[in-house]
Image (cartoon, grey):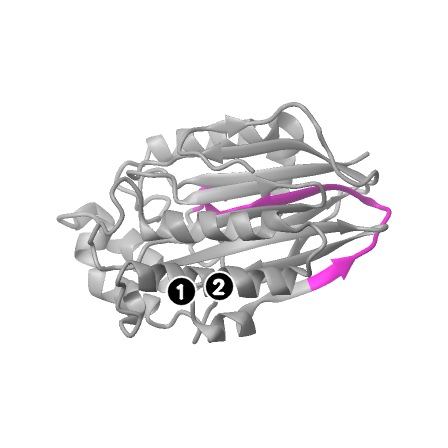
Amino acid sequence: MYLSSETVTSPSPTLVPPQYRVCQTLLDKGSGGVNEDALAVGNKVCIVCDGSTGLDAGELIPGSSGAQQAAEITAAVFNEDNERNLHLSAQIANETIRARMQEYGVDCSQREHLWSTSFAAVQLSGSGINWCQIGDCLILLSYEDGRSKLLGNLPGHDEQILAHWQKIGSRAVGTIHQVMGEQIAAVRRTMNRAFGALNGEAEALEFLVQGRIEDDLISDVLLFSDGFFPPTRLPDKPLDTKKLVDLYKTSGLTGVRDHIRVLQSNDPGCYLYPRFKMFDDISAIALQKS
């Protein structure tokens, strides 16, 4: 399992069941203090996670954060058993996150304080792929005939905040968190009511999206957090899947990362391409047909 605060790439193939192989991984720290993404690559199961820290502004764990804890817990649980049902792994991870919060004295009645994580996972099984997803980590299939297909749901819960920031950002005094902190907290309180994430609440499991894919025309499977989305000026259209696949096919995971970082560097105010921080953490895994 790869869990690191630094960039991690894996150019050498990791063998999984014969129809697919893990050909690249990327774990890249953004502009925050710690990397709040995590990933794991097992014999049959691969997962990317994107943690989100509770809005209490406290550091309960020196050198870490609640987001990092939630993401790493989830990656570790899925990596424990490559044969276990993905839904069950999500349930175990969710319960473990709650237990860890209680251990550190987090007031779980204050919902905006909860540690949480999105994730996207695949399990190679027979001739197909079992998959499971929640939040803004996604799975993208690329087909030999040029088509692409997104698995899971992109919640869109931050669209209004980002659209508003795009309008006022150049005139604002302070960061998006300073200017729109109350709105951000209000959205966070709708977690597992309007959108899902693993945060220790039983309701999180109602937002899991899962399925199975068997298709001989699939050439590539990409798992990634929202830090891997190429920047866009359209908050209501956060992901151009064709552009992402084209970038990946041309330059690989690190090429996509480099493209993203250049655009973000040219927008330090985070309002041309509206987002919550200069550089987001990135986790991504690419599988190819063997």
- Whole-number angstrom distance, CA of label 1 to CA of label 2: 7 Å
Q: Which residue is mark 1?
A: 98
For the residue labelled by badge 2, is the local secondary structure a helix, a strand or a loop? helix
Residue 285 occupies which quadrant of the picture?
Answer: top right
Q: Which quadrant is the C terminus positioned in?
A: top right
Q: Looking at the image, can residue 46 be seen?
A: yes
For the residue labelled by badge 1, is the local secondary structure a helix, a strand or a loop? helix
Q: Which residue is mark 2?
A: 94
Taking 239 as reference, is 180 above or below it? Answer: below
Which amino acid type corresponds to the residue marked 1 in the rendered image?
Answer: Arg
- Counting from the top left corner in percent of width and height, residue 242 is at 64, 44
What residue is at 33 percent from the left and 66 percent from the top?
A: 188
The range drawn in magenta is 211-232
Taking 244 as reference, is 171 above or below it? Answer: below
Q: Count residues near mark 2 (Cα–Cα under 10 Å), then give few for <14, some for 14-19, many for 20+.
A: many
Residue extending farthest to the top is 12
**Near-viewer residue (95 or 58):** 95
Does the magenta portion include 216? yes
What residue is at 27 percent from the left and 39 percent from the top?
A: 63
Does the magenta portion include 26? no
Is 126 left, or right, of 268 in this rendering? right
Residue 190 occupies which quadrant of the picture?
Answer: bottom left
What residue is at 56 percent from the left and 38 percent from the top?
A: 1
Q: Are marks 1 and 2 in contact (CB under 8 Å)?
A: yes
**Near-viewer residue (273 or 154):** 154
